[in-house]
Image (spheres, rainbow, N blue to C red):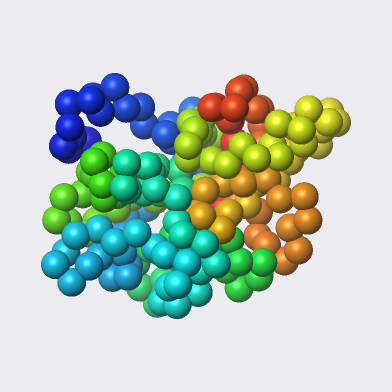
Amino acid sequence: MLRLKNLSNKYQKRTLRVVYGQTQATPYAGTLHSSLRNTDGSFRKPLSTDTSPLTRSADAFTLKNGLVPGQVVLKGANDETFALATGANSAAEKPWGLLANFVGGDLDELGDDDFVGVWRGPDSVYEVLAPAFDDTGLSAAAGSNTVGERLKLYAGVDGRLVYVSSPGNRVAVAELIQRVSASRILINLLV
């Protein structure tokens, strides 16, 4: 449930919606990594200067000062903590799923709690609304895509889903089923 701090946000839509997931999609419970909280317990946006838990090359994307559902998250190696993906061109960064909650800012769903949900499950289908994905380059790539071939989407440097023409060692997070518009895509989750 959204804990709106401003009445002007009452029409905010959830940026991630499960379309087909009766047996494939799994909401996975965990907690935010401590790097996403200030010492007073308030939300802290991941910055390009961060080195913990991962080195970032860009500030994390935020909407109204908080993270949005649909951003790519990573799971801690030996615990149930989640951090925002950095989009590193490395096979070592393995996406775990997509953030299910608004975290921090004006749309915060957590309040003082650190418990979050992460959607995961190969072959589950989701509708992702902007700005939870980066449409840069996606329109041209989707327009030139051939029948039977699906574009792969990866974690971007700001934590959002993004199309990358030369992914290198990156691990694909999803396949694009349809780019409906610049503000809406359908994806098949791969993690």
Please state the horizontal and vertical placement of residue 4, each as a whole percent of the image: 18, 34
x then y, percent, for residue 90? 66, 70
Task: Kindly indicate the quadrant of the structure image that contains residue 100.
Answer: top left
- Is 133 on the left-hand or right-hand side of 112? right
* 173 to the left or right of 59: right
Most foreground residue, 21 or 128: 128
Closer to the camera in the image, 2 or 45: 45
Above or below, comparing residue 161 to residue 37 in the picture: above
Image point (62%, 46%), residue name: 162
Within the image, what quadrant is residue 144 found in?
A: top right
Q: Residue at x 46, y 59 (%)?
A: 59
Q: Is residue 104 above or below residue 3?
A: below
- Residue 180, above or below 55: above
Does the image show residue 87? Answer: yes
Direction from residue 141 to residue 84 in the image, left or right? left
- The quadrant holding residue 49 is bottom left
Residue 168: percent from left, percent from top: 76, 63
Which residue is pictured at 61% across the width and 23% down the height? 181
Residue 26 in sight in this render: no
What residue is shown at x 16% (from left), y 50% (from top)?
Answer: 111
Residue 14 percent across, percent down from the top left: 36, 31
